[in-house]
Amino acid sequence: APSPTGFLHIGGLRTALFDYLIAKSLGGTLFLRIEDTDTKREVAGAVDKLIEILNWAGIKFDEGPRAGGDFGPYIQSQRLDIYKKYTRELLAKGEAYPCFCTEERLTKMRADAEAMKKPPRYDRACRNLSREEVDRRIAAGEKYVIRHKLPLEGEIIVRDELRGNLKFNLADLDDYVLIKSDGIPTYQFASVVDDHLMETSHVVRGEEWLPSLPKNISLYKSFCWEAPKFIHLPLVLDKNGGKLSKRKGDVAVEDFRSQGYLPEALLNFNALLGWHPAGEKEIFSVDEAVKEFDYHNIGTSPAIFNSEKLDYLNGIYIRKKTIPELIELCRPYLAENIALTGNDYKKSDEFLAKVINLERERLKKLSEIGEHTKFFFADNLSYDKEMLVWKKSTPASTKINLRNLLDILRKISQDDWQTKKIEAIVAAYIKENDGGVGDYLWPMRVALTGEKASPSPFEMADALGKNETLDKIGKAIDKL
RNA sequence: GGUCCCUUCGUCUAACGGUUAGGACAUCAGGUUCUCAUCCUGAAAAUAGGGGUUCGAUUCCCCUAGGGACUACCA
């Protein structure tokens, strides 16, 4: 039940994932409900975006605004009549009351309490207004909210399925707001009513909701409804142990997607934050996780979001993809490089397949493919000629070596121009001449890539083709 | 300030009350006919502190410390 604020927070994805794992492992139904009761934060198009990104991630809902279902509407702003009905019921039972206190008064009261180092709480000024006064003030057009009339003392024991029974003192609880002055319910009210009406068996939410559990349970009691089970997921923190916030880095799932993280990696990584399958296997799909998932094994301590491990997992999932899949996945990141060349062959899927095949094992994120493969597309490379010289070698001998290499390569037929064959011929030549392997291969590789790190010279020669290979080695010789 | 939650290598985590406290990421060192990466091998690295209970505590209880959440007419 996310609120549509414009983007999906990575923590929201994790919650959705655990929702999915819990529902599926129990043979249940997973439904999506949009909690858009905060009209001030409403963002146009947010619901569609939310559903789209959830879909991309691979979290499928059995019921929801798009999927349909018997318990709709699944968008809270379309359920206002329902909330009105239940508000009247609560009022009639004496479990709630209208409050006319102004925001100014409440704000001042809080500030005063804070200044005196006392817990800021509502003083329940309107709790015992007479029926006549209430009617008169409403008739006079005064604004009011509806508050939950909580017991003044005693304790309440609530249960979190992960942490067990939790005891709260009712005196510490506020008569919190159920219905705002604009008639729209708060989360606390709408979620309880909807969870009851939608026959929710398990409420899965972040640990930040734990403090409001006694309020929620109290509301179920006021309605005489049976409460669902509650599972509060441990929080995910940033690398400094703070809140994962938009200001401090990427938290939007959209951002992870555009950087080239795969949903498989994101899901696998998030599942490991708080849960672990039996045995030592850490690479698994969501379906595999469902098979042995038991929500009782979810941890309770907060976890730090460690992007290094995410990168590692992403690299693994990238390497699991087929080349045709990767061509489509990488195409957007390759567009800039493709634009560099006038050679039509280099724009073909055949060439892209070669490029991706050679670079895939170096990728942690798909977005890196652009920077890693520029030299495949560039007609002219720019690099310092010093880079051509291997370790203790000299420019003069490097030049000679490259010239000899050029002669050898020129003699290789078009048919034999393949990684393995080029390698065999060059290796034989080097051995014959008693040369140091690095004295030939390093300059050859630099000549073809202009980089200190790249695929092997033979792979590059194969991908580039005979003409371009000879051309680039020639240019390197001219530099020296 | 109050209420509540949490505490095993740097990080994510595993260990019916009995293990040389295991695995993974990261780090470091080797290996894999040039570089980088992949892959393989190895190393270093933890039970927050103090009390109990027990023949025996990472495990159960209490206290302390530390971290976090909540404390809105936001969710």
Image: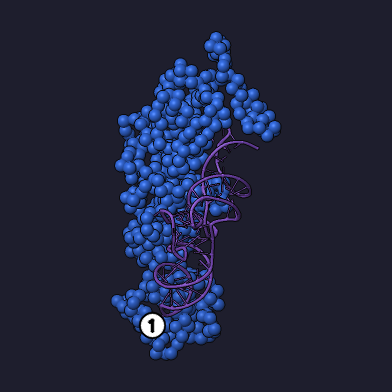
Chain colours: A blue, B purple
Residue B51 relative to residue A52: left or right? right
Picture residue at 62% right of the left edge, 26% below the top: A106
The percent coordinates of residue B45 (x first, y second) are 54, 64
Residue A154 relative to residue B39: left or right? right
Picture residue at 43% right of the left edge, 28% below the top: A220
Number of numbered callouts drawn: 1
The amino acid type, in three-letter code, at marker 1 is: Val
Where, by quadrant of the figure, is residue A225 drawn? top left
Q: Chain of mark 1?
A: A
Residue A403 relative to residue A462: left or right? right
Q: Quadrant of the N terminus of chain A?
A: top left
The percent coordinates of residue B34 (x first, y second) are 46, 78
**Which residue appears farthest toward the right when viewing the image?**
A116
The percent coordinates of residue B12 (x first, y second) are 48, 54
The answer to whether residue A260 is seen in the rendering is no
Q: Describe the element under mark 1 as helix, strand or loop.
A: helix
> Is residue A153 shown above or below A34?
above
Picture residue at 32% right of the left edge, 34% below the top: A68
> Is residue A181 shown above or below A270?
above
* B56 or A193, nearer to the observer: B56
**Which residue appears farthest toward the bottom when viewing the image?**
A433
The percent coordinates of residue A418 (x first, y second) are 33, 75
* B35 or A300, nearer to the observer: A300
The answer to whether residue A198 is seen in the rendering is yes
Mark 1 Cα-neighbour bin, 10 Å: few <14, some 14–19, many ≥20: some
Where, by quadrant of the figure, is residue A81 drawn? top left
Question: Residue beneath label 1, please?
Answer: A426
> Is residue A408 shown above or below A205?
below
